Image (cartoon, helix red, strand yellow):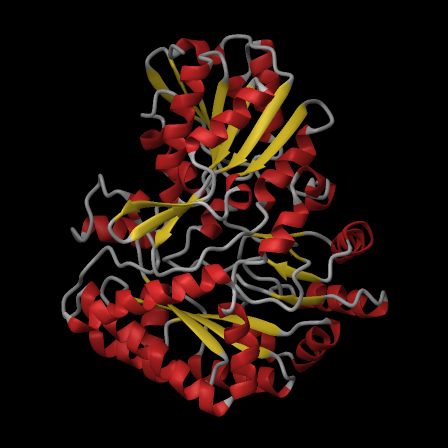
Amino acid sequence: MSLKSSVLQHPVNKVMLIFPPITVPRFMEKVCCLPIGIAYLGAVLRDRYEVYLLDAVVEGHHLERKVAPHKFQYGLDSDMIMKSIRSFEPDVVGVSCLFSHQFPVVAELVKKVKEWNPETITITGGTHPTFLPERCLNEEALDYILMGEAEESFPALLRAIETGNGQENIDGLAFRMDDRQVIHPKTSWIKDLDLLPFPALDLLPLRKYFNINMPANYFFKSPRNIPITTSRGCPCHCNFCSSTNYWGNHYRTRSAENVLAELEHLKTVYDIEEVQFEDDNLTCDIKRAKAIFRGMIERGLNLSWNMPNGVMINTLADRELLRLMKESGCYEVTLAFESGDQWVLDNIVNKPLNLESARAIVRNVKKEDIDTHAYFIIGFPGEKLAQIKNTITYLRSLDLDRFLIFFFNPAPGTPLFQECIDRGLIRDEYQTEENHYLISAISDQDWTPELLDKMIWREYYRFTFLYIFRRPWKFFCKYVRRRLRQDAIKTFFHELVENVYRFSK
């Protein structure tokens, strides 16, 4: 397709939305999360178009391919996806690019789509193309990029394609025309999230998700679990996080009544027994959060739930909120500390959190018999080795049920991404597609990625050894049961071999 042809009139009857396969380090376990993004888009498009949702991960979760010495990819490959495309014969193919490491797959797929039928319109969206539209548009087989949330802009784009005009009026759209790139920055966001239809779950194979049962944080109470989002954005402006920028730099919520209506819908229509709230900050609006949890109790929904993306720790100082969380079915909270060094939090991360106050909050969460899971990040630019050790010491003091330590990696759309460029830690052409939060991309002053890698794994092994003896029954319920899964056992041995090699170096 020529550069001009992306603005020509083109009939649209069938739309296919694809969540592509995932590439991860070989010591990571595979996950299988229902892709809420394309489920929402399917819901807003289905009244006007014939829509087909294809999640390459759930359809090919058992399929693995080595793509680098220490990385593998799982899910349907591009040839398998093309088989479905040829069968459905869509007029428009949209491919999600939630993670930077998915873009090479997106690029390969849109090339094959154009080889099959040059008239098929190709579109992508997600965090990676939202913050790097110029780079992504260098892929000539890609016609359009929808930046940020697309429930309004996607239908507008399809109407413009059908009529042959109007692209210049679509907010957050990037495309090529007359041998140049046209990028309309994202400036408007959906004001009333209650107006959105519930995600089109019936267009996805729910039973396959239940059978695979590997949600975002690997842990669950019931295999009949499903992700749900009740808000978009975050009021904080942490320097490492692109989510706030992606959602328009302001926090928007669905009403408690709208959330409860969806929970009842999930319960009655799909017999869901557990939900995983994927909000960036579920309890940010404490009054709204309490209304949701009270409603879950009063309506007798009997749902287990957790929050794998993390929560604003300060909000959990409210003891009534904690009690309502427990009574409504909360069995675990994910505490997003980021760092265990106060100076790093204040001066590098820009996170409004007092670590001493947070320590007391963790104790109160435990008093409600809610498990504690925490996220930490090490290797920030400008962070000293002593400060990284402070984080390790701090997390040990919390007596957590589990934790994850991530490497900092510069994400496009964040202040620290630009700082890394300015300091020469990465170059302008830095390949964000190689980003992964379990592999560091930078070195700084008195530490190296190899040193931090050893520190992290030693801490994991130390924690696991102590946890077995302190809480043997909980260890069995949370870890051994999961490890008994065939794919998890395989990952465990990969992990073991990988780390014996690491520590022997």
**Percent of width and height locating residue 246:** 48, 45
Q: Which of 105 and 9 is in front in this view?
A: 105
Residue 175 in sight from this viewpoint: yes
Q: Residue at x 66, y 78 (%)?
A: 322
Q: Nearer the viewer, residue 27 or 376?
A: 27
Q: Residue at x 61, y 51 (%)?
A: 209
- Residue 183 vs 63, above or below: the answer is above
- Residue 405 vs 263, above or below: the answer is below
- Residue 287 vs 134, above or below: the answer is below
**Percent of width and height locating residue 332:** 59, 73
Residue 173 in sight from this viewpoint: no
* Residue occupying the far right of the picture: 299
**Percent of width and height locating residue 208:** 62, 48
Q: Residue at x 35, y 49 (%)?
A: 72
Q: In the image, 421: left or right of 487?
A: left
- Residue 244 vs 162, above or below: the answer is below
Q: Which of 444 and 109 is in front in this view?
A: 109
Residue 504 picture quarter: bottom left
**Percent of width and height locating residue 80:** 47, 31
* Residue occupying the far front of the picture: 486
Q: Quadrant of the N terminus?
A: top left
Q: How many labels does the image show?
A: 0
Residue 256 picture quarter: bottom right
Q: In which quarter of the image is the C terminus?
A: bottom left
* Residue occupying the far bottom of the picture: 470
Q: Residue at x 85, y 69 (%)?
A: 298
